[in-house]
Amino acid sequence: MINALNLALLALFSFALLVPGAAFLVAPKGETVLSSEPTPFPSLKSIVLPSPEGRKSLSSAIFDRSSVKYNAISLRNSLSYSVLGAIESSEVVSGSPGWLFYKPEFERWGCSRRATLDDELARAETILDMIEAAKANVTFVSAPNKASIESSRLAGSAARYAPCYFDFESDFRASLSRYPATVVIDHAQALEALGGDAQRYYYMDTHWTPMGGYAAIAQLRASLPDALSGSIPAIESQEPAMRRTDLGNIMLRFRSQEPSVNLVLEPTASPESGAGVLIVHDSFYGIVAPQLKSAFPSATLSKLNGRAPPDADTLRKFDHIIIESVERQFLARMNLSWTRPDSLTFGWGSPLGDHILDQSQLLAEQCNWDEAVNIIEDKQSHALVRGMEFISSSAVRSTADPRIMFRLPPAQGRLVCLEAEFSHPTKTRTQLYFERDTPGDGRSMFAEPQSVFRLVQPGRSRISWVIPQSALGRMARFDPVQDGDFELNSLRYAYGPDF
């Protein structure tokens, strides 16, 4: 009797486990990846109740955590890809035969996000402009999306996303090309130089191959000779290996891994190469980290994902800071709000943003402040005060959104610095806007993406900036505080040495 009962329970348990697996295989529109949040186990009470809902939840919870689901997904995806030659899920889309692409990279640069992307690019350009003007010790690095380099492989399902993607990609790439390599490095240049015959990216992975990574490291060294001394060590050997791919093995659960090689570099790099250099990176530099350390033995590598970014004290310790990011996250990481200690953002308000502005203020000390021009009194500046009323020579009563609009001097080829000194009883945000590049489109002359801001503590503050060359001779707007009464002691500009 007991054995019969046990067999019955075992049969019921197996049925609960296998039926969803069989249904999963034949369901026409089921998702093709494992859920990152499996169904929670129901309470014991709900399982024994007459209603079947508790037992259904138990079945789903067991199934979500079982090898049955893993095997069912693997079998279904393998059959679909081998028979149909194409596959598409929420994360993966197939291109030419054998090629898989990460679907979110297309969605983030899709037509529906174009207005947002334009604003994000404008913010990034403002940050890069300030780095260039300040001669700051910060270099951003873009590791291109697989689709940007392997565009000829965007056939089949992936081809649908190409028009919108490349419409923005061309603007993004053109924008980065405006800056010197000390400000931003676009690794698309190094990868494209390898030529179409070289396999630059894995077939079923989002990342570049070891040879693609080696080309990126060589470009990094050539772009920053003052920070990264010596020559790149030659390749000593290529050891055959197999790679577990993120698109194929992890997301789609394919069984077979992709052939790869382990690059071993000759031990010829100077031990001091990379001394004083911090390289903050994501998985693209992560998979070539051994080669990075071989090329730049003294550099400090810091992972971007899964941990808090470097704080202000850490940043001040280094002579040069390199921030590497995959293309699809490059703009987002400069635009996200700095809301918590582990926010993966490098825009204004973050420790890196403040570091860039500190560098700007340091260079601004070279301007001739003994001959500074008072902007509010200067006729050439055409200063216009709004939302604020002077009740004495420095005391200001705010009415709404206090701001001063004025024209920056047209001094191309010379250092131009702006300085503001003011007092506020509480912590506030001070913000400098530059005139937008596309007037006449119905939008305001000034917008958040083309602005620079930082938080200031209560009391008296003195802030100065080196103005980007692209902003000179154009209108600017300065918001000393967010709201409330304050004292404005000075707002002036001064010239520095010729370039």
Image (tube, rainbow, N blue to C red):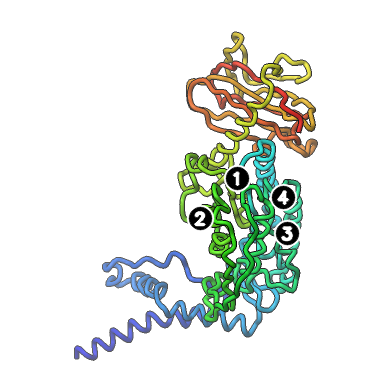
Residue found at x 65% / y 82%: 84
Q: In front of the other: label 3 or label 1?
A: 3
- Which tag, 4 or 1, sits closer to the chain's start? 4
Q: Would you say 468 lies left or right of 400 here?
A: right
- Amino acid, disc 4: Leu
- Amino acid, disc 3: Gln
- Amino acid, disc 1: Asn
When asked about the image quadrant of residue 410, the answer is top right
Examine the rendering and report whether any part of residue 106 can be seen.
Answer: no
Q: Residues within 10 Å of mark 1 (few under 14, many from 20)?
A: some
Which label was assigned to residue 309?
A: none
What element does badge 3 sit on?
helix
Residue found at x 66% / y 74%: 99
Which label was assigned to residue 335?
A: 1
Quadrant (top left/top right/bottom left/bottom right) for the C terminus = top right
Which label was assigned to residue 176?
A: 4
Q: Would you say 266 lies left or right of 492 here?
A: left
- Amino acid, disc 2: Lys
Q: CA distance from mark 4 to mark 3?
A: 11 Å
User: Is the C-beta separation of discs 3 and 1 under 8 Å?
Assistant: no
What element does badge 2 sit on?
strand
